[in-house]
Amino acid sequence: MTVLPNNWVTTDLESIAEILDYKRVPINSKERQKRKENKKLNELYPYYGATGQVDYINDYLFDGEYVLLGEDGAPFLDPLKNKAYIVSGKFWVNNHAHILKGYISNKYLCFYLNQYNFIGHVTGTTRLKLNQSSMKNITIKVAPLNEQNRIVEKIEELFSDLDKATEDLKKTQEQLKIYRQAVLKAAFEGKLLEMGLAKYSPFSEICDINPSKQEIGELNDDLEVTFLPMLAVSKTGVILEKKIKRLKDVKKGYTFFKNGDVLLAKITPCFENGKKAIVKELKNNIGFGSTEFHVLRPKEEVISEWIYYGVSLEDFRNKAKSQMTGTAGQKRVSKRVLESYAIPIPTKPIQEKIVKEIESRLSVCDKVEKTVEQNLIKIEYLRQSILKKAFEGKLVSQDPNDLPACELLKQIKIEKDKMSKNGK
């Protein structure tokens, strides 16, 4: 167990912060939209929820600096994600966030809550909830006020460096995306390797799109086949999970495919996330999965990888996205878009050579991207390490001239008692 510095104390959250949940007023989206009509942005105020701003509204409930801590819907058990955040100025809060005003430094309190272990404080399974009575009992390690300010200053300095490193890594990710598309564009324009005079053909001529299940009609219902959940297909083309099921359990209500078929997500947001894959190693050469995929079965003159990279082209994806049908929350790529989009079709040997060159170049991207992702995760763990060190009294030096935290708590109690007598 960590021993705190002599001039620190441990107390509960209720002792060092004013809880203003009673002032919250939730407003549904329809009402907020009505209240925003004919208003300019500078006439509106931020509307906050469990993890941040969710909208604007034409009025405010609070004015000043506060700490908002999620009540439900916050990532309480994820050590790398924030559960609390600082807001300032005029704003409105719904009932998914607790509202705290610290008698100590608000920033100190916010940083502390973002490294706190909420196990034992939250209830629920799919949507965790931190009720007010449990929140009041959160243990707070309180440093002297001057040291709180030094801790906050040091954390902000170190986090600023980490923010810059994160920004640089994310720029690298964007550059990798651009490079990937440049490789594909060059490949399909004959600039990566010479493909000769290749004719352009629409997908409708070079593959069967969403082929029928007619060929499985005579098969035994107890035949074992592969089943792929939607989540099993990653944006990098890797199939993460395969399940074995009986044909009778999946042949109705699911999409049918075979080895070598290309799966392309057709529903938002999976299409926008780039979910697609070449199907391989299916049990008995038969697979079933989500109806949210288009299936492209290459014809004799085309290899699967050529189709796969064809639907990866930025030009195709932009055209498909611009012609999506359906409502805003459930837009889909229609079969018609696939049928009409044309790509060059060189001979099979040329396709294989170009694909080999594509994969050679993209494999370098994969390695760099993996390193970038690992470093982004390391940065988040480093943030937690900094916070842990801060609230163990090890991030900045102690000053014996600082007013001890126990004296600070006494002053807070005196002021609270005065306010209580005055009806505040």
Image (cartoon, rainbow, N blue to C red):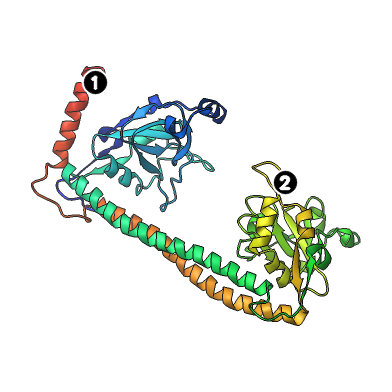
Residue 35: x, y in percent? 51, 25
In the displayed structure, does residue 37 sit left or right of residue 228?
Answer: left
Screen quadrant of the C terminus: top left
Q: Which residue is mark 1?
A: 420
Q: Is residue 352 above or below residue 234?
A: below
In the image, 1 versus 165, the foreground residue is 165
Q: Is residue 233 above or below residue 253?
A: below
Q: Is residue 242 above or below residue 116?
A: below
Task: Please give the name of the residue rendered at 17% of the width and 27% of the height, measured from the top-left corner.
Answer: 414
Gap between marks 1 and 2, in whole Å? 60 Å
Q: Is residue 417 above or below residue 187?
A: above
Residue 102: x, y in percent? 27, 35
In the image, 84 versus 205, the foreground residue is 205
In the displayed structure, does residue 74 sit left or right of residue 88?
Answer: right
Residue 48: x, y in percent? 44, 35
Q: Which residue is mark 2?
A: 325
Closer to us: mark 1 or mark 2? 2
Give the amino acid type for the residue marked by disc 1 in the picture: Ser
In the displayed structure, does residue 329 sit left or right of residue 287?
Answer: left
Give the amino acid type for the residue marked by disc 2 in the picture: Thr
